[in-house]
Image: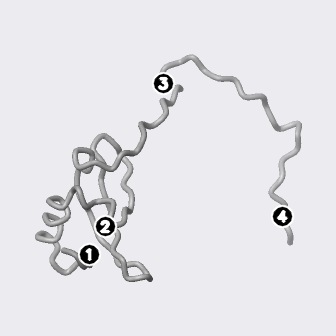
Amino acid sequence: MKIHNVCHISRLQPFVSSDLPRFLTPPPPPVEIEGEEVEQVLDSRRNKDGTVDYFVSWLGWHQQTWEPFIHLRHALDLVNDFHRRHPRKPRAPSL
C-alpha cells in the first residue's frame, strides 16, 4: 500500500499573524561562542574521525548543542571541570 504525503487544497488556510504576546515568538539571539555564555559541559563523545565533541548547555538557552573542542578553547576551565567529574569520558588530545 502506497500513501502519498499530500493534502487537498481545500484543507489549507492562509497564514494570519497574531498580535497576542503569547503567540509571538521572538527570534533567538545570535549564537556567539564565548566563555561567558557556556553554562556547563554536560557530556563528551569521540567522532569517527577521532575528534572530540562536547555537549554544552548555554547560559540563557534551554537547548544544548554538540560543539567541537576547538569551539570551546576559551572555556577550558569548564571542560576541565567536566573531566574532573567524569574522568572516563573521551577527552580532547590537547587536554
* Residue type of the residue flagged with mark 4: Ile
Q: In the rendered image, which residue does mark 1 sit on?
A: 92
Q: In the rendered image, which residue does mark 2 sit on?
A: 69
Q: In the rendered image, which residue does mark 4 sit on?
A: 3
| Dot 3: element | helix
Q: In the rendered image, which residue does mark 3 sit on?
A: 22
Q: Residues within 10 Å of mark 3 (few under 14, many from 20)?
A: few
Q: Is residue 82 left or right of residue 52?
A: left
* Residue type of the residue flagged with mark 2: Phe
Residue located at (30% from left, 53% from top) = 57
Q: Give how far across and how far down residue 27 sits, in percent.
A: 49, 33
Sequence-wise, the earlier of marks 3 and 2 is 3
Instruction: Find out whether the residues at labels 1 and 2 contact each other: C-beta distance under 8 Å.
Output: yes
* Residue type of the residue flagged with mark 3: Arg
Sequence-wise, the earlier of marks 4 and 3 is 4
Closer to us: mark 1 or mark 4? 1
Q: CA distance from mark 3 to mark 2?
A: 37 Å
Per the rendering, the mark at residue 72 is: none
Q: Is residue 24 above or below residue 87?
A: above
Q: Is residue 31 above or below residue 66?
A: above
Q: Residues within 10 Å of mark 4 (few under 14, many from 20)?
A: few
